[in-house]
């Protein structure tokens, strides 16, 4: 089953204006499938193939001129020499949408784009499936724990892989292929331990010194490795909101993974039924919801938000930035609404002079309600949050 991706319309619009389109994202997120679907008449060249790579390295000018009508260059960061020739080609002939560049090593790809193609390229990030994309397909599940355990990577759904096995193989492949190319990391076993320690801190304030100490590495090395994980779309750091309202606020970021399936595999969770009683279930649920919001923002062109927390523990899990309006979002994994769920929103609304109509609670149940202190959405309505917030 071919599952339509939300970001497709934005990419197609930009291809009519920009000569180069870049689609980055983690391995196996569907970049190649999407590019071929949007541009079915384009030639396709994978630069992971040794023969194509050799042609591009030996004679990049001839290689580029071989595709005058449009080409998808997959994993283009493997031949960095091409970027200067692509620049020359698009400057020589103003042809919208001629080059579609994809890559899973965001650090290397964006570095080359900034050097050679600034102003000529529209950049998009494709993450694994969103809940919105899986709705009304064979993969629309009733239980949130099934999504938390399975994760959202396309091959698990397209091919039917067992989630934990696929995720562990993905991690192994990621370590063996990408990490060696992005950074000169020789101790892969230690790096994998570091990755597992990150999974154990998901949804928590990031203490790099503590993480480094437990892993037995320096603070600088830990910071470098976190950057590697970010560049390859495994983790992201959610930054704190900068307005303090005359309160002492937390300045550390919070650590999240883009995919909860990888988190569960790294934590040794073997099935969806184990999540219900797992001590990190709330953190995993929060990670899932925030990553879903970010997918919506990537697809619709929005900006990633923040969290807010003061030194006394008052916190809002996520702040949406919508047309210069800040929408607080509280996330609770419980299925039964209680008054405690609204504490963070009530405090924020008093502090920021915000209205309940511009406040959102997402919880582990399925009912949508308007409560005194916020609009309430069930977890399966997460795809509606971004649009409905902007229309309120």
Image: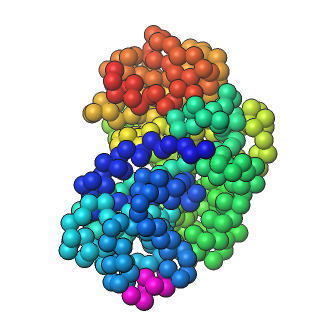
28 sits to left or right of 92: right
Q: Which residue lies furthest to the top in this view?
A: 372
* Span of residues in magenta: 53-59
Tell me the quarter of the image containing the C terminus.
Answer: top left
Of residues 367 and 13, the one nearer the viewer is 13
Indicate the position of residue 5 as horizontal and vertical percent values.
48, 44
Q: Residue at x 68, y 43 (%)?
A: 150
Indicate the position of residue 350 as horizontal and vertical percent values.
37, 19
In the rendered view, tell whether residue 352 sits above or below residue 271: above
Q: For residue 264: magenta?
A: no
Of residues 288 and 37, the one nearer the viewer is 37
Indicate the position of residue 16 as horizontal and vertical percent values.
27, 53
| Residue 305 quadrant | top left
| Residue 122 quadrant | bottom left
In the rendered view, tell whether residue 299 sits above or below residue 94: above
338 sits to left or right of 276: left
Q: Which residue is drawn at 30% across and 48% down?
A: 13
Of residues 19 and 306, the one nearer the viewer is 19
């Amino acid at each position: 089953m071919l599952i339509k991706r939300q970001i497709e319309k934005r990419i197609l619009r930009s291809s009519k204006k920009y000569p180069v389109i870049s689609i980055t994202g983690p391995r196996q997120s569907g970049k190649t499938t999407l590019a071929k679907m949007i541009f079915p008449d384009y030639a396709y060249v994978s630069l992971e193939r040794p023969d194509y790579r050799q042609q591009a390295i030996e004679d990049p000018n001839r290689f580029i001129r071989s595709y005058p009508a449009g080409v998808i260059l997959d994993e283009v960061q493997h031949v960095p020499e091409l970027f200067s020739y692509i620049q020359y080609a698009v400057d020589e002939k103003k042809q919208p949408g001629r080059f579609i560049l994809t890559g899973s090593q965001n650090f290397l790809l964006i570095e080359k784009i900034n050097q050679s193609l600034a102003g000529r390229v529209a950049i998009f990030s494709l993450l694994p499936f969103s809940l919105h994309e899986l709705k009304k397909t064979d993969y629309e599940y009733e239980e949130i724990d099934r999504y938390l355990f399975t994760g959202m990577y396309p091959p698990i759904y397209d091919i039917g892989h067992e989630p934990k096995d696929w995720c562990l193989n993905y991690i192994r492949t990621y370590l063996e292929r990408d990490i060696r190319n992005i950074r000169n990391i020789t101790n892969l076993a230690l790096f994998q331990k570091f990755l597992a320690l990150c999974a154990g801190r998901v949804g928590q304030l990031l203490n790099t010194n503590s993480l480094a100490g437990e892993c037995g590495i320096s603070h600088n090395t830990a910071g470098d490795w976190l950057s590697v994980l970010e560049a390859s779309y495994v983790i992201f750091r959610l930054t704190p909101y900068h307005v303090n309202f005359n309160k002492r606020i937390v300045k550390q970021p919070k650590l999240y993974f883009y995919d909860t399936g990888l988190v569960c595999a790294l934590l040794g969770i073997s099935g969806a039924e184990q999540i219900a009683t797992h001590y990190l279930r709330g953190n995993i649920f929060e990670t899932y919801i925030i990553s879903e919001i970010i997918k919506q923002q990537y697809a619709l062109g929005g900006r990633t938000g923040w969290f807010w927390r003061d030194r006394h523990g008052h916190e809002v899990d996520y702040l949406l930035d919508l047309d210069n309006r800040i929408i607080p979002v509280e996330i609770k994994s419980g299925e039964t609404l209680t008054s405690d769920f609204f504490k963070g929103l009530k405090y924020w609304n008093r502090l920021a002079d915000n209205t309940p109509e511009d406040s959102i609670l997402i919880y582990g149940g399925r009912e949508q309600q308007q409560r005194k202190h916020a609009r309430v959405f069930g977890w399966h309505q997460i795809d509606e949050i971004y649009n409905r917030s902007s229309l309120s």
